[in-house]
């Protein structure tokens, strides 16, 4: 019995490292989401202009997924994961010293390259090191790192931003670099990668995709919709709470903490459920259940109602996402498992990277420059995307519990 078929200290260390890699990655990304208004004020521009930093962060992630994915398929998951974490940590720190918006955007683009490598490489390492029977749960654990990172960003925002400013927040965001020490000392290489490589050169990307091109196209489209689902309900939501609902910094932080707890619960629930009812059915169920919550989520007024609606929405959004890591890894061709999931995921990010700018433009068009109607843009995008995801996933493929330790 291989090490990947049993649970022990090694498997727990691997899952912990991959979870923290994605958590701290999301922490750094959402740190910027929380301080959009402060950045725009400091640079003397509008929020729409600053959202281009979000666009380029997301747009560069496919490059990181391809670069670090190929490194992982050639040289191992472990060194590629450490390198990607180091890159995004350094760029996060450098962002604190940006003298202008244009320099800031360039640094966030470089941050996106490092960020792009973490998800795919970490997921491959985790699933290749843990038992097949636990994949649904592990998928949920890995993906809720995204919500956990957002939660940590919200806590840090509420506690620190008025004291240290947005630049100080980016300095705090360098803490993920410490994760490299943990990976180096506690996390071994993937046993499936060692067994299948056998000292042979890694499969080329073209050879790995041979016979799987339609699968790749489908996966990119699926992840485009998924990224609109996630970013469409998150990126401008703190701005909406501040500008349209008039909540204070402390109230926004509290609401963000609550809805990210919802995301964590949803990711764990639907990830685990996917092991019983299937990956596609679990995703479709979460997308379907998001629809009744849309109007409540976008048009609630009081803090308690807003927080409740946001909790429910992120329970469903991140619930659907909780199935994604295992679903993409099971669909991936064996020889490019570290590359395929990350690249299709990040290409979906690229195609959805205009989300924040698009929603901002819609809000201004439906409202005005002084009073953008974010409620309108958020709810319209979420409704269309949830319906599209529900239909798309039901007609796609599934390879639940496929073996990872053989080609």
Image (tube, rainbow, N blue to C red):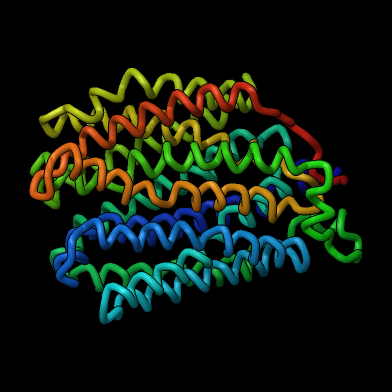
Q: Nearer the viewer, residue 118 or 20?
A: 118
Q: Inspect this view and state whether residue 75 appears.
A: yes
- Say whether residue 325 is left or right of residue 33: right
Residue 195 placement (x, y as % from top left): 87, 55
- Where is residue 120? Give x, y as percent: 62, 53
Residue 199: quarter of image: bottom right
Callout count: 0
Vertical relation: 335 (above or below) 104: above
x%, y% of residue 188? Answer: 71, 62
Q: Which residue is at the front of the view, 295 or 218?
A: 218
Residue at 25% across, 47% down = 360
Q: Is residue 328 found left or right of 228 in the rendered image? A: right
Percent of width and height locating residue 311: 30, 32
Please identify the quadrant where the N terminus is shown: top right
Along the viewing direction, whichever of 165 and 224 lies nearer the viewer: 224
Examine the rendering and report whether any part of residue 11 can be seen.
no
Q: At 55% across and 70% down in the image, what residue appears?
A: 180
Q: Which image quarter: residue 94? A: bottom left
Question: Where 205 sits versus 323, above or below?
Answer: below
């Amino acid at each position: 019995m291989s090490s990947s078929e049993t649970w022990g200290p090694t498997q727990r260390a691997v899952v912990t490292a991959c979870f923290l890699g994605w958590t701290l990655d999301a922490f750094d990304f959402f740190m910027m989401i929380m301080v959009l208004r402060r950045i725009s004020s400091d640079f003397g521009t509008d929020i729409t202009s600053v959202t281009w930093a979000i666009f380029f962060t997301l747009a560069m992630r496919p490059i990181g997924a391809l670069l670090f994915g190929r490194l992982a398929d050639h040289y191992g998951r472990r060194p590629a994961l450490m390198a990607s974490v180091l890159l995004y940590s350094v760029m996060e720190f450098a962002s604190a010293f940006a003298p202008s918006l244009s320099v800031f955007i360039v640094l966030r683009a470089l941050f996106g390259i490092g960020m792009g490598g973490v998800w795919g490489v970490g997921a491959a390492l985790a699933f290749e090191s843990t038992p097949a029977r636990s994949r649904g749960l592990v998928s949920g654990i890995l993906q809720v790192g995204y919500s956990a990172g957002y939660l940590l960003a919200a806590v840090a925002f509420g506690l620190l931003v008025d004291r240290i400013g947005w630049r100080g927040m980016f300095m705090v965001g360098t803490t993920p670099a410490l994760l490299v020490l943990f990976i180096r000392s506690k996390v071994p290489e993937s046993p499936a990668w060692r067994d299948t490589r056998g000292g042979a050169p890694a499969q080329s990307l073209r050879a790995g995709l041979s016979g799987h091109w339609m699968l790749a196209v489908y996966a990119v489209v699926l992840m485009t919709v998924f990224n609109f689902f996630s970013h469409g309900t998150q990126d401008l939501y703190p701005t909406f709470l501040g500008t349209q609902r008039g909540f204070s910094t402390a109230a926004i932080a509290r609401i963000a903490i609550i809805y990210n707890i919802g995301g964590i619960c949803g990711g764990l629930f639907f990830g685990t459920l996917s092991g019983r009812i299937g990956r596609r059915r679990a995703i479709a169920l979460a997308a379907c259940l998001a629809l009744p919550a849309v109007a409540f989520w976008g048009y609630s007024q009081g803090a308690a109602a807003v927080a409740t609606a946001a909790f429910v929405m992120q329970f469903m959004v991140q619930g659907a996402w909780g199935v994604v890591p295992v679903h993409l890894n099971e669909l991936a061709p064996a020889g490019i498992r570290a590359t395929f999931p990350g690249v299709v995921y990040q290409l979906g990010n690229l195609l959805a990277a205009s989300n924040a700018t698009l929603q901002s433009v819609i809000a201004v068009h439906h409202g005005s420059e002084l009073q953008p109607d974010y409620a309108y843009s958020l709810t319209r995008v979420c409704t269309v995307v949830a319906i599209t995801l529900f239909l798309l996933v039901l007609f796609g493929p599934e390879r639940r519990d496929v073996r990872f330790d053989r080609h």
